Amino acid sequence: MSEHLPLQKKRILGLDLMRAIAVVMVIFHHGFSLFDFPFIPIPDGVDIFFVLSGFLIGGILIKTMEKRKGFSLADLKIFWFRRWFRTLPAFWFTLLLNLILYFFLNLQNLSIKDTLKLMFLKEKLWQYFFFLQNLTSNMISRFFPETWSLSVEEWFYLLLPIILFFALKNRLKPYKAILLSIIIIIIFPTIARYFFSDINLKWNWLSTRMVVVMRLDGIGLGVFMAYIKYYKPVFWDKLASFKILIYLGIFIFYASFYIIHENYYYFNSYTITNLTFYTFTSIGVMITIPPLSKIISNDSIFDRVVTFTSLISYSMYLINGTFILTIIQQILPTDVSEFGKFLSCIFFWLSTFFMGNLMYKYVEQPFMRLRDRHFID
């Protein structure tokens, strides 16, 4: 969700489009709480972010490994610091904003001491600083819930390079080491969903959706596409030539969501949902990447809008839900009209783009420039 393509004269519009669509889907779902839209079964864009992140990060790891003829501790350090300089400043900035907002909202009913106890002892909000809030179970707090997916990605950034490092230490060739790492990062979360989720829970897929150890496989499938691109270039070019994969991928992505969502009375089996739902949605996204990666920006107005949305998507994702949405909900009167709700929804979207742009310029970019000066791939 958080890894952007490097700036270049000719951007890959297809991948920018994937990211832009994903963040619009996320914001659309959050906006439901402001305005009573007629229900539209639109999938969450998080699965798109997962697969795309895996593809981009996987490509970075593979290129580093092949360039260095291995993967040393120094390479691990550079990789992690580049990722952390890219993701953590904007996240910690937004986290602090939300903690301040949460503190003052609770002061309306509690003392300062009780508010701090609630935040850091009962709800354990300190865990958010280290992405522990949903590592092995669902979050115990309703605070900043959208960060569940960022937590999945951050743990992926930490774990995959470690697995790759030890695979190479066992004298595996690079292509075998990355393939083994991909298999591990896909198989173990699937096993975890099958064996460690509550088999008696109806709609169990909603219970496993936000748990880190059960969601890493979607990102792993993205890495697998990076593996194909680098090590199987002829096959990759053949896949990229099949534009029908875009439509097939969209169909699989949407159908897997729609079938589970609309027919939960028939598909409430934890076996079916946990072993197929997440896998098929990710496969649907995965197969669209080769043909989409061949679509280059022509600098049209549409291309610029897509690129702009893609660039600020991480900041939009961080700021829209808990912070902007909470402020709007606090300001809105309880007896607001339907038209007032509609205007608040428009304001929500405009504020998300505006603040996302500000965060990208004044939080993300300065740290990315700092990263590029001190931690070179």
Image (spheres, rainbow, N blue to C red):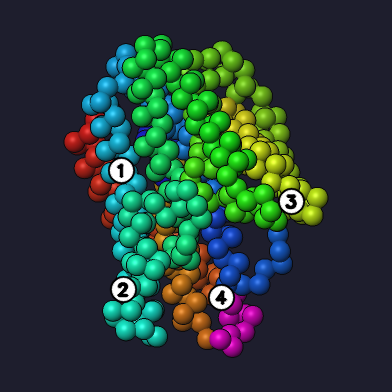
Nearer to us of marks 4 and 3 is 3
Task: Say which residue label 3 marks.
Answer: 268
How crowded is the residue under tag 3: few (<14 C-alpha within 10 Å), some, or many (20+)? many
Nearer to us of marks 4 and 1 is 1
Nearer to us of marks 2 and 1 is 2
Task: Say which residue label 1 marks.
Answer: 84
Residue at image location 19% in from the left, 36% down from the top: 373
Gap between marks 4 and 3 measured at Cα: 38 Å
Asked whether the beta carbons under mark 2 and mark 4 sit within 8 Å of each other, the answer is no
Q: Secondary structure at mark 3?
A: loop
Name the foreground residue: 48 vs 102: 102
- Placement of 314 over or under 284, stated as above or below: below
Gap between marks 3 and 2 measured at Cα: 40 Å
Q: Earlier in the sequence, mark 2 or mark 1?
A: 1
Q: Earlier in the sequence, mark 2 or mark 4?
A: 2
Gap between marks 4 and 1 measured at Cα: 37 Å
Task: Say which residue label 2 marks.
Answer: 116
- Along the horizontal axis of the image, is 97 left or right of 316? left
- Placement of 102 over or under 195, stated as above or below: below
Q: Secondary structure at mark 1?
A: helix
Gap between marks 2 and 4 measured at Cα: 35 Å
What amino acid is labelled 1 in the image? Trp
Task: Say which residue label 4 marks.
Answer: 343
- Can residue 294 be seen by looking at this rendering? no
Q: Earlier in the sequence, mark 3 or mark 2?
A: 2
What amino acid is labelled 2 in the image? Leu
